[in-house]
Amino acid sequence: MSEQITYRVVISKGERAMQITVEPNVFFKAFVGKKIDEAIDGGLIGYPGYEFTVKGGSDLAGFPMRKDVQGGIKKRILAGKASVGIRRHRIRKGDRIRVLVRGNTITDQIVQVNCVVTKEGKVQLFVEKKEEGGATPAGEAKAEDAGKKKDKKKKEKK
């Protein structure tokens, strides 16, 4: 029995990001054949009026895409410390390491695509989750939780 592959698109704007799942036929129509830094019409994935720019992605096994590797291939490259696909704790300054990465073209093997918003549409992308008492801004909710934790610690010390 073969499993259906789940294709994901991570959309970000500023410090906010959201992840959506996309049907395979929609994914192939919108993304396959596109390269890093190319524009995607948001209407193809359910966000009319938006335009997204592809900034990267990863394949089934988690290998990242690199802008400087041409095509949709998997390739072992020699990379330095500040490169995509390197875990910084593995090497020291000046060292280079051979890593396996994907090319800059989206193929059917890519399961996650990272995009950035370049043109806004009418539909609001990032919607705050509503609490039981109504909508509260995320900052206020965090501040209230932090205050409650401090109060509990003070009571425990007494």
Image: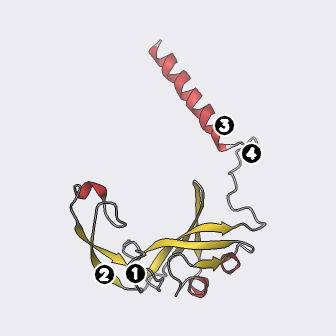
Q: Which residue is mark 4?
A: 135
Q: Residue furthest top?
A: 158
**Lower sequence index among marks 4 and 3:** 4
Residue 5, above or below 87: below
Q: Residue at x 22, y 55 (%)?
A: 92
The residue carrying pointer 1 sits among few (fewer than 14), some (14 to 19) or many (20 or more) residues within 10 Å by Cα, namely many
Instruction: Determine which of the numbered discs, if any, sits on residue 75 in the image.
Output: 2
Whichever of callouts 1 and 2 sits on the residue coming sooner in the sequence is 2
**Pointer 2 or 3: first along the chain:** 2
Question: Where's residue 94, x and y in %?
Answer: 22, 59
Could you tell me if the residues under marks 1 and 2 are in contact, i.e. CB atoms within 8 Å?
Answer: yes
**Kind of residue sitting beneath label 4:** Ala
Q: Residues within 10 Å of mark 2 (few under 14, many from 20)?
A: few
Q: Residues within 10 Å of mark 4 (few under 14, many from 20)?
A: few
Q: Secondary structure at mark 2?
A: strand
- Foreground residue among 129 and 97: 97
Q: Is residue 129 visible?
A: yes
Marks 4 and 1 close (CB-CB < 8 Å): no
Q: Residue at x 40, y 81 (%)?
A: 103
Disc 3 target residue: 140
Tell which residue pokes out farthest to the right in this image: 122
